[in-house]
Image: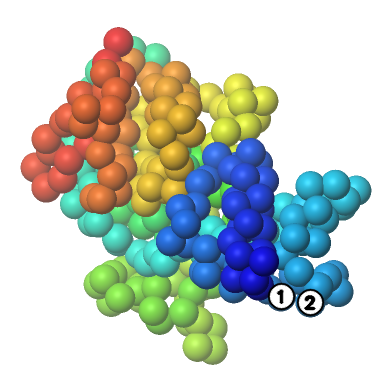
Amino acid sequence: MTMEDHNQEAFKLIREVIYQHSGMYFSDDYQKILLKRLEKRLDFHNLSSFYDYYYYLKYNKDSDQELKIVMNLVTIRETYFFREEGQLKALVEEVIPEIFNKKSDPSPIRIWCAGCSSGEEPYSIAILILEQELHQRGFNLEIFANDISQEAIQRAKIGEYMKSSFRTMPVFYREKYFTPKGDKYVIKSEVKSLLNFSCMNLLDRNKLTFLPLFDAIFCRNVIIYFNKESKQEVITQFHKSLKKDGYLFLGHSESLMDFTDLFKLKHFKNALGYEKVG
């Protein structure tokens, strides 16, 4: 068997471990990228092959900690402030006022950013909430944000960003809600105060049961990494986690059409979303 054949078989085994841990499924086309990202772990553990690394992930007593490192390496996603801005505006200008007008109890309006990466998405929502002065107008709001990568969540909590993260954000917002720090910009505490960050696996049913019900969920450019079974489980969980008439926002390349009857397509002024059915 050639080295290429060995790597192909090892990739399939490692892929299965990652899938069982996170629900994320990498196609054969992702083999070179995945193994390239994991090469440094072979060197770190002084292992000679990806087969050896598979056995480490599967049977070593420290495999749980190693899988956390693996998730940091394989879930690197490009993100930036005000990405797909139409959906953010739909939330702040249409969804939140609609929900507030329907409310008959004093509980807060809750938003969940599932798979938030390094925090640009939930911070963008918080900035728009502050800019619309929704808090001052009596809107009680909470934003929950999670990612499976501990490294990403730590970066989000610190809230320091390079200029590349501001490629689509008007300079006005950066000057108002960030403080310069060398070649970076630090998010101000008034924005941080709206957010609750945590590390979480979207397939971890035990942790998910402790979440409150939400009025809106953002899960953009995440479920593209899931196969059909995992995607169905996550979408079903989102349905359970939403209040009646709650909304789900996905990435532009993701769709629930012909996939589930738990949600129906919702047309907003500048974006598309999904409304909970039942």
Outermost residue toward the right in this view = 61
Give the left or right position of residue 197, taking residue 94 as reference: right
Query: Circle 2: is it few (<14), some (14-19), or many (20+) Cα within 10 Å?
Result: few
Give whichever of 256, 1 is nearer the camera.
1
Q: Amino acid at mark 2?
A: Asp
Q: Residue at x 29, y 49 (%)?
A: 251
Quarter of the figure with residue 163: bottom left
Colour pattern of the rendering: rainbow
Of 59 and 121, the residue lying toward us:
59
**Which residue is at a point 39% across and 14% down the rendered structure image?**
105
Q: Position of residue 178 (x, y in %)?
A: 44, 71
* Above/below status of 227 relative to 48: above
Is residue 196 visible in the rendered image? The answer is no
Question: Which quadrant does the C terminus fall into?
Answer: top left
Give the spatial CA distance, label 2 vs label 1.
5 Å
Name the residue carrying label 1: 40
Kind of residue indicated by mark 1: Lys
Residue at point 22% right, 37% down?
Answer: 273
Q: Does residue 225 appear left or right of residue 171 in this picture?
A: right
- Image-based side of 88 in relation to 176, left or right: left
| Relative horizontal placement of residue 111, taking residue 50 as reference (left or right) | left
Q: Which mark is residue 43?
A: 2
Element assignment for label 1 = helix
Q: Secondary structure at mark 2?
A: helix
Q: Is residue 219 above or below residue 186?
A: above
Residue 207 location, quadrant:
top right
Residue 166 x, y percent position in the rendering: 35, 74
- From what the image shows, is residue 190 above or below residue 41? above
Q: Nearer the viewer, residue 124 or 77?
A: 77
Quadrant into which the N terminus falls? bottom right
